[in-house]
Image (cartoon, rainbow, N blue to C red):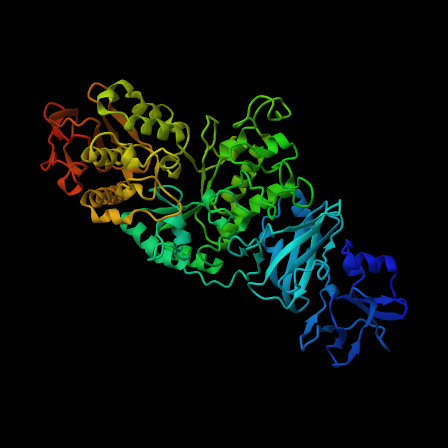
Amino acid sequence: MTPSTNLSQITKIVNANHHNPHEVLGMHKAGDVLVVRTFVPHAHAVHVVCDAKGMKWQMELIHEDGFYELKVPRRKNLFPYKLEVDFGSGNTHITHDPYVFPPVLGELDLHLFASGTHYNLADKMGANFITHEGVEGVHFALWAPNAKACAVIGSFNNYDGRRHPMRLLGGSGVWEIFIPNLATYDAYKFEIKTAHDVLLQKSDPYAKFAQLRPSTNSLLYKMGDFKWGDSKWLKKRRKDGALNIYEVHLGSWRKTEDGDNFLTYTDLAHQLVDYAKYMGYTHLELMPIMEHPYDPSWGYQVTGFYAVTSRFGSPDEFKYFVNHCHKNGIGVILDWVPAHFPKDPHGLEFFDGTDLYEHPDPRTAHHPDWGTLTFDYGRNEVANFLIANALFWLEEYHIDGLRVDAVASMLHLNYSRNEGDFSPNIYGGTTNLEAENFIKHLNSIIAQRHPNTLLIAEESTEYQGVTTPVEHGGLGFTHKWNMGWMNDFLKYMTLDPIHRKFHHNLLTFAMMYNHSENFVLVLSHDEVVHGKRSLLDKMPGDLWQKCAGLRLAFGFMYGHPGAKLLFMGGEFGQFIEWNHERELDWFLMDFEHHRQIQDFTRDLNHLYNLEPALHGDNFHWIDADNASQSITSFVRRGDKPEDELIVICNFTPVAYEAHQIPADQGYVEILNSDEVKYGGSGVVNTAPLIPENGRITLRLPPLGVTILKRQ
């Protein structure tokens, strides 16, 4: 039989070189003849089955590699049909022909994507279960503008890139195909042929799920079936008030009883949420749970930006976790990493044979600290990929906030780089203007669509306006990690008390700039790894002094203006550094002094949550300059006079039986870190403190904090 299309077209299909296979394959009118063409390597026979009448015609093998064609007898008009493919040994499949379906993406989709403003990309790109032309299947869409050809490969086609080639939609750089009859958990990747005929196999950048490492396959997953029960939480949640964050690495908070395996999202929904609620935390901040190949990266080197990691379960199981958090009054913040991505060959690096996602200048693209690549924020499609990703986590998973990692490295072209190792911006400066615009775009869209979402920047430089709204010239974050306070405070707390009087400014300096941004005080995972020692071990002195010093540190932190963040393990005095490979040392709960630290942290958390004076920035020093005794005292006020608190901290092991501070009202002690039940020496104030001659006299505990409330 003479084929109805020319040999050149057939050769392109057979060699997987066609940018628009739909114009060859499928059903077409060829003059007065109706033809069906398909390419199925290794088939023994292929038939066309008429859906309406059940008629069946055998297709003729035109090319030995598996190109089949049928000139339909006595038919001139297009009609619905299926393909019956016989692979031998009784292995026969009947399926819709993917090449009869029109495009799924419309001109508006492509226009919005090209302009960087398609905020629902998760529903359009990657792999999504849809009903198209009345048929259920999966729509695959891929951005690879410099590719010669693209195909979907997977468990359903023996990873043969010739079976499901994709079509290029005009000049958009987007390739797509609709494939019927696929199922949840089918594994797949994209095969990309570069302009130089190099075949790349890439995981789906928009995949919703992936196989457990070391596999790099993406997995089909039907989103949207989960039944949420958190509508009350979503309506009442706020981005102000008490913000008391427990930072957690899910893989090492706890493990299974044998100590070898991860807890599932379902396990964590009950164990971790119950613990956080008991301890008085308002939010959990999860170190990245996006898919990543390398456990020691702690999740910060992401390859699956839209995929919840399979280490702990499925997307619906993670939704169960979030839903359970919300039902128990706990918010969920995700660490989100738009600053860089790893060089794993299945990931975003050199995605279509060019520097597509990474910055085009190799000096700027290479991140010297982590051996990763930086995003090209000036490219609309790349910025859109990231902004839509942030929205995806907020909308699909009901996440309450994002803590944006490594913002400083995004904003500064010379971050960790020497002169000559970066390209200045168009004005000759060191600010990454494209990243700056990206962040403003991101935060303004989130503020518009989800006004009560927390947007927290890990920004370690003196960049101005991080938490100023975008409309007022700022970056638009709601909060910024106070890295300056953290560095000064930990430096001070590691000093022997006898030397602290010479470094008193380390305690007080943060109030000089406290009102410049909306800060979170952080004692994060970064401070208890790589030889920095645990928080408890940073404290000088013997065991009693270490425990007292840690309680004092927490008391000062919670009295100081700013939201709070504490990394897991610190709350009970983990004694060794955090190790991501093992669970926290929960056996320490067998020892009284660790239980006492935990008890104090719990009571301090609940006190912080209940006292409105501790939530805002209304702060007044009583005595900021008592360096000789290493004592600080200050007032915290709320909206009502009776909200007023006084916080007094003694950073030496010397107790004072008659310490005086000015006051014109009576106060009662509501928390003292030196109570015997917390492991202290019992220097407490049990009776109300009544002013005499404008002063109150109180007992001030050694290495302790006392919090007084106005009567």
Give the mark count.
0
> In which image quadrant can residue 14 be found?
bottom right
Placement of the N terminus among the 4 image quadrants: bottom right
Q: Which is more toward the observer, 635 or 73?
A: 73
Instruction: Kindly identify the residue that appears in the image at 63 percent across and 41 percent down.
Output: 357
In the picture, measured across the screen, residue 410 lies left or right of residue 691, that is right
Does the image show residue 684? Answer: yes
Q: Which is more toward the observer, 221 or 80?
A: 221
> In which image quadrant can residue 573 be found?
top left
Q: Which is more toward the observer, 707 or 349?
A: 349
In the displayed orientation, state which residue is furthest to the front: 89
Provide residue 316's location: percent of width, then percent of height.
47, 60
Q: Is residue 537 positioned above or below 512 on the image?
A: below
Placement of the C terminus among the 4 image quadrants: top left
Q: Is residue 337 positioned above or below 321 on the image?
A: above
Provide residue 552's location: percent of width, then percent of height.
23, 33
In the picture, measured across the screen, residue 692 lies left or right of residue 321, that is left
Q: Which is more toward the observer, 614 or 351?
A: 351
Does the image show residue 108? Answer: no
Q: Is residue 557 positioned above or below 607 on the image?
A: above
Provide residue 17's location: percent of width, then percent of height.
78, 53
In the picture, measured across the screen, residue 348 lies left or right of residue 470, that is right
Instruction: Kindly identify the residue that appears in the image at 65 percent across and 57 percent down.
Output: 140
Provide residue 182's location: percent of width, then percent of height.
62, 66
